[in-house]
Image (cartoon, grey):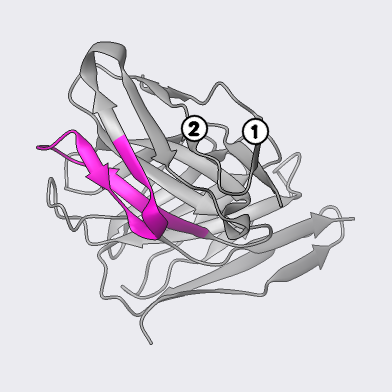
Amino acid sequence: AQSVTQPDIHITVSEGASLELRCNYSYGATPYLFWYVQSPGQGLQLLLKYFSGDTLVQGIKGFEAEFKRSQSSFNLRKPSVHWSDAAEYFCAVGLYSGAGSYQLTFGKGTKLSVIP
Amino acid sequence: DGGITQSPKYLFRKEGQNVTLSCEQNLNHDAMYWYRQDPGQGLRLIYYSQIVNDFQKGDIAEGYSVSREKKESFPLTVTSAQKNPTAFYLCASSIASRGSTTDTQYFGPGTRLTVL
């Protein structure tokens, strides 16, 4: 069965500093990988996704992620964090079922705090 | 505006009562999903449906039931058999097009259920 590990439960960075959130997955085949962001009490918003092709993926809000097959990782990065980036971030692996839809397995999330 | 609506946002019930959470989408998506979120646990899949009148159990289906009578609607019933129903419930939908880069799960705003 596939699994996703986000090693950092909580990260605090200063506004303007760079950010890297770690994600490692366990999956037998080439994975479909996602990063979502959640503000308190809200639903999840997709930041970016990797299906195939270029291993460096650009997303919304200035985020990017790099798929590294050799390290089974899909780390999320942002060069300069803004106070509005404070939220919880979830990495997920997609496993396709037979009919075309897929199930997502989520990591437990990393909470990001931003110091002004 | 296209999107996913969940109602109500907050729901309180007494222990032993069944309760139904609503999820409606106007994105013309084939697949719909229900997830449960607990603090520090990420999201876990309860049920999913790839087509009308068909649905499959996810990882934690015990104590829950669903129906899919219309493409737009996928209500979740939390039964009295669910031992720990207090949680944040998220509904999602996707187009169910295997491998397509447009195949993304979009999430509703969630319903917070508290059982007293």
Q: Is residue A93 left or right of residue B77?
A: left
Subunit that carries the residue with mark 2: A
Question: Relative to residue B57, is residue A71 depicted above or below?
Answer: above
Using a 10 Å C-alpha cutoff, classify the residue at mark 1 as few (fewer than 14 neighbours), some (14 to 19) or many (20 or more).
some
Residue kind at label 1, given as amino acid type: Ile
Q: Which residue is mark 2?
A: A21
Q: Residue furthest left?
A: A53
Q: Residue furthest bottom?
A: B1
Pick the front one: B48 or A7: A7
Q: Earlier in the sequence, mark 2 or mark 1?
A: 1
In the rendered structure, does residue A54 fall within the stretch colored magenta? yes
Do discs 2 and 1 share a chain? yes
Give the residue type that dot 2 points to. Leu
Q: Is residue A40 above or below residue A71?
A: below
Return the x and y of residue A43 as percentages of the image width and height. 55, 61
Q: Residue at x 53, y 49 (%)?
A: A81
Q: Disc count in the image?
A: 2
Residue B61 visible in the shown view? no
Q: A52 above or below B110?
A: above
Q: CA distance from mark 2 to mark 1?
A: 8 Å
Q: What residue sits 49% from the left and 32% below the top?
A: A21
**Magenta stretch contains residue A51:** yes
Q: Which quadrant is home to the C terminus of chain B?
A: bottom right
> What segment is highlighted magenta in the picture?
A44-65
Question: Residue extending furthest top?
Answer: A70
Position above or below: A92 against B109: above
The single residue placed furthest to the front in the displayed view is A16
Residue at which label 1 appears: A11
